[in-house]
Image: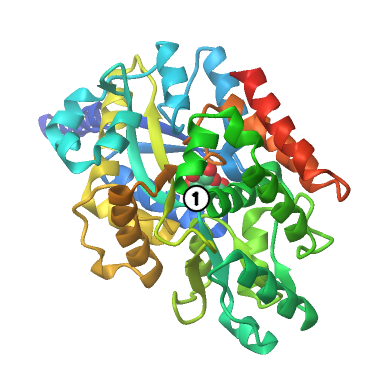
Amino acid sequence: MNVYSRLVTAISLASLISLSAHAGEVEVLHWWTSGGEKRAADTLQKLVEAKGHVWKDFAVAGGGGEAAMTVLKTRAVSGNPPAAAQIKGPDIQEWGALGLLADLNAIAAEQKWDSLLPKQVANIMKYEGDYVAVPVNVHRVNWLWINPEVFAKAGATPPTTLDEFFVAADKLKAAGFIPLAHGGQPWQDGTIFEDLAFSILGADGYRKAFVEQDKATLTGPKMVEVFAALQKLHGYIDADAAGRDWNTAAGLVINGKAGMQVMGDWAKSEWTAAGKVAGKDYQCLPFPGTQGSFAYNIDSLVMFKLSDAQNRKAQEDLARTVMEPEFQQLFSQNKGSIPVRQDVDMSTFDACAQQSSLDFKAAAASGGLQPSLAHGMAASSYVQGAVFDVVTNFFNDPKADPKRAAKQLAAAIQAVQ
Ligand code: GAL
């Protein structure tokens, strides 16, 4: 080997070493697998890869994330958790207590998370005062999605009250459409139940029932009304709803087979992916009777302690990327949510996101901002699971008694407290 080729070898070795010193692998567990949500997840992957890291996708299909959480527990128990996982709300505290989470305080200080995030949001991301998770976005759960063309064909009017909702549903049914596109999975049943409770109990009653888990509210006449409304609503879904995924249900509205869907605004990711325009091809309405209120669902990535220095660097860059304005905008525009940072310019967002952002601020000031129960923000996953059991059993039994269901609800929650 002459001097020249030795030099070339040395240089390429050096650049290889510096490349590998820079590149780390970051494994991210999430359940963003629908067509629209995958596009959103891809934006994160690209931005992380642009920082020189290797993205290892750990996607576990299943809306609401129940399957993903089961897989995560298995991995964590075997001492091999991923670098990051979508874990939300009070469950972050449970994971924090296990002592498995990484401390993100240095990055939070560098990027000034405390001043960029609403206090309520920052607190959810901390365990015993230390940041252990980075917030991704803010979803609103109390939405109703409408196909205006279907409504016009049926002579139906977009509803603002629950009574109007049932009037519209009757018109859609009479015209031969599926009034309400629904997927019969516990978390989807739970989402509808939560929206009905938000509407009938109001923000205050909702908080008493699901955040404070107040027995009198859980068994009271308004809760009985909620179950009665849920039973009535069952008459407007189609016979094939059992087990259907939420994005397939969204597809029924997009394709003009159904008139409405009750779903959080990740449903918008499907409309966006289908090239449909908010306010023109589809309408987003606050769920009837919840105008001005906002049931929030904040996606967040919890970071696990890692031993490999390069992977740790990749993990830190992942956390940084999530809070950068570029990601906040791109991700939410594909996902259907709004940025969690309060300083992002909303002018490039669609009409639904702009309304969501305004309503979030107004609801925060008025007390109408409440955590979603069905999406793990109001209570632990144990309480959430107990509610789903009661609600799904009730929903699937046409003869079930609303009064009894309210009592069962309180008892089921009490049993897991
Ligand atoms: C929620 C999650 C959303 C969305 C939805 C459907 O729990 O926060 O990001 O993925 O489930 O799976």
**Numbered-mark total:** 1
Does 244 sit left or right of 3 as displayed?
Answer: right
Question: Is 190 located above or below residue 268 in the figure?
Answer: above
Q: Position of residue 243 (x, y in %)?
A: 76, 49
Q: Position of residue 171 (x, y in %)?
A: 72, 80
Determine the image quadrant of residue 240: bottom right
SS at circle 1: helix
- Report the front residue among 128 and 25: 128
Judge whether residue 1 can be spotted in this image: no
Does 44 sit left or right of 374 as displayed?
Answer: left
Q: Quadrant of the N terminus?
A: top left
Q: Amino acid at mark 1?
A: Gly
Judge whether residue 152 can be spotted in this image: yes
Question: Is 4 located above or below residue 330 in the figure?
Answer: above
Question: Is 97 located above or below residue 144 in the figure?
Answer: above
Q: Which residue is mark 1?
A: 202
Q: Position of residue 207 (x, y in %)?
A: 47, 38
Q: Position of residue 43 (x, y in %)?
A: 37, 53
